[in-house]
Amino acid sequence: MRHDLTQRGRAELRATRRKSRALYWVVGLFSLFANLLMLTGPMYMLQVYDRVLGSKSEETLIALSLLAVFLYGVMGLLDFVRGRIMARVGARFQIALDRRVFDAVVRKSAVAPDARAQSGLADLEAIQRLMTSPVLMAMFDLPWTPIFLAAIFIFHPMLGWLAVGGGAVLILIAGLNQFLSRLPQLRAGQAGQTAGQMSDQLRIEAEMVQAMGMRDAGFDRWQQARGQALEEQIRAADIGGGFTSLTKTLRLFLQSAMLGLGAFLVLRGEMTPGAMIAGSILLGRALAPIEVMLGQWPVVQRGLKGWDALSTLLGEVLPEPPRTALPVPAAHLVARGLSVVPPGDRTPALRNLSFALPPGQALGVIGPSGAGKSTLARCLTGVWPPAAGSIRLDGAALDQFAPGVLGRHIGYLPQRVQLFDGTIAENIARLSLQPDAAKVVAAAQKADAHTMILELPEGYDTRIDAAQQRLSGGQIQRIGLARALYGDPVLLVLDEPNSNLDNEGTQALNTAIRAAKGDGRSVMIMAHRPAAIQECDLLLVLEGGACTAFGPKDDILKSMIKNHHDIQRAPIRAGGVA
């Protein structure tokens, strides 16, 4: 099954690459003429040694030199043009897949984060770098290596066999390099990634690390991971460096050996001095693609690794099918027989859940930790698909809406509100590059965050640094509520919306809920604290992923305890309210 998914992803990558097939043919044609022009040097030296020095004709030397200058200029121009073409081929490949890979990374990370999702965009960049690197152009030049070797055989078979033997040894070294360095490089990459993730986590939680005296312990853990990464990197560098030095030494030795053998043959009268020099130059041309590939081998390995990883990711996360545009739905939410299995688990977190939420009403969802409240929120927003049953908004299943469209219809406030790099206005406008100022201010006013935002140094234009947020938890939560209200969604899903709010913030939240109900929108609130369900009309009680009670709030509360008025002042505990 995994193999089939990978093959499907590879087919998608190959289909994207085929879109530039015509450009590959152009590069191949230019490579043909560029490699033919590489014979300029050997032919020039052959003519100089065998004709010019023998005839002592300055006119012939000048004519040959001018011709060589012209041919070298054309060769340089062709090489420059094909390099520019390949740079655009790589950029075209990346642009064609940017949206696809980005969506796959986000969707995979939202459902079940793993290493492939985290490195998806980096894998695409690695493939793009491989396509624009000199090694790919060397692949176009590599078919000419046998032709150059054949030309050396024409000068003398002994020179030809020396060149073939040297080239075979270089290829063998390249194979050994790949075989012996692959595992150390893989371990080095994994160790480096682990150390990087740990440093990012310590940096993001720097305030807690500093406040709790965890800096030294955090450094020790990071240094341990970093030391392992360095050890693996040194081992990989030693192997790669050893093969690089061996390759360079062998290449220089081959050139000297060609000259020495050629001189021996000249002394025996079996070839001319011009052929000796030309053979040495042809050997350099023949081995040049192999040398480039050996020098660029880390780029090749990273690109191939990125191709495999991206194939698996794209095979697992298929492109979203086009959906027929539906009108703006009414705020009528219905769940029937809903069961949800969290990604990677086998046990349902929600089982056979059914309820209905009409427009203009608020539904409170209460229960102990682990009862399934956040799972229900993720399912309502389309992040986790139902394993059984259905959720319908105005009669349409949630998957009938495109994700971007569904996000505009549903405003979501998660338990942990995360702000992104950008201005407060851009965060409220859900990262839009051109926020609608009127809608931003309206959403902030509905969340009662307008005055709070104006008191910030630059108001709505205050920039947020996601890694070093200086706003309080309550401020962040109210900005998150404004983001949920942006664009007037028909359904609000609020997961622990008052967990960081003070009394004033809680009153503002309740005011926003009343306003949403008054506008005909529906609201779902996952709550532990009674103040959060003050404006609720209906109540759903979850325990162990199953519904234990559903109905009008007052009726549910009266059935759970005798003193109905005391419940609204006491904390909610496991099994309901106490």
Image (spheres, helix red, strand yellow):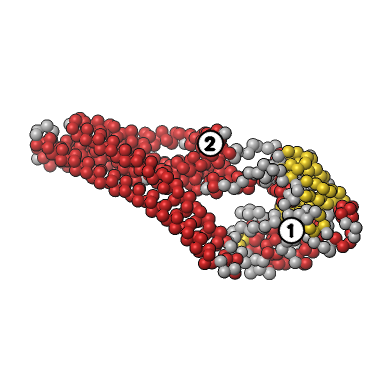
Please give left or right for residue 163 compared with residue 524 in the image. Answer: left
Q: Position of residue 79 (x, y in %)?
A: 34, 41
Q: Is residue 37 above or below residue 231?
A: above
Mark 2: give few (<14), some (14-19) or many (20+) Cα within 10 Å.
Answer: many
Residue 422 appears left or right of 70: right
Q: CA distance from mark 1 to mark 2?
A: 41 Å
* Viewer-closest of 328 and 243: 243
Q: Does the rendering let one see residue 368?
A: yes
Check disc 1 and report the residue beneath it: 497
Residue 52 visible in this rendered orientation of the protein: no
Mark 1–mark 2 CB contact (< 8 Å): no
Which residue is at 31% across, 41% downward?
A: 173
**Front position in the image: 530 or 521:** 530
Residue 14 higher or lower than 416, as above or below:
above
For the residue marked with disc 1, what is the amino acid? Pro
Q: Quick check: 56 above or below 569? A: above
Q: Residues within 10 Å of mark 1 (few under 14, many from 20)?
A: many
Residue 324 image point, x, y percent: 70, 37
Q: Which residue is mark 2?
A: 6
Quadrant where the C terminus sits is bottom right
Residue at 57%, 33% (x, y): give it: 1
| Image location of residue 410, percent across then percent down | 73, 49
Disc 1 is placed on an element classified as loop
Q: Residue 436's image quarter?
A: bottom right
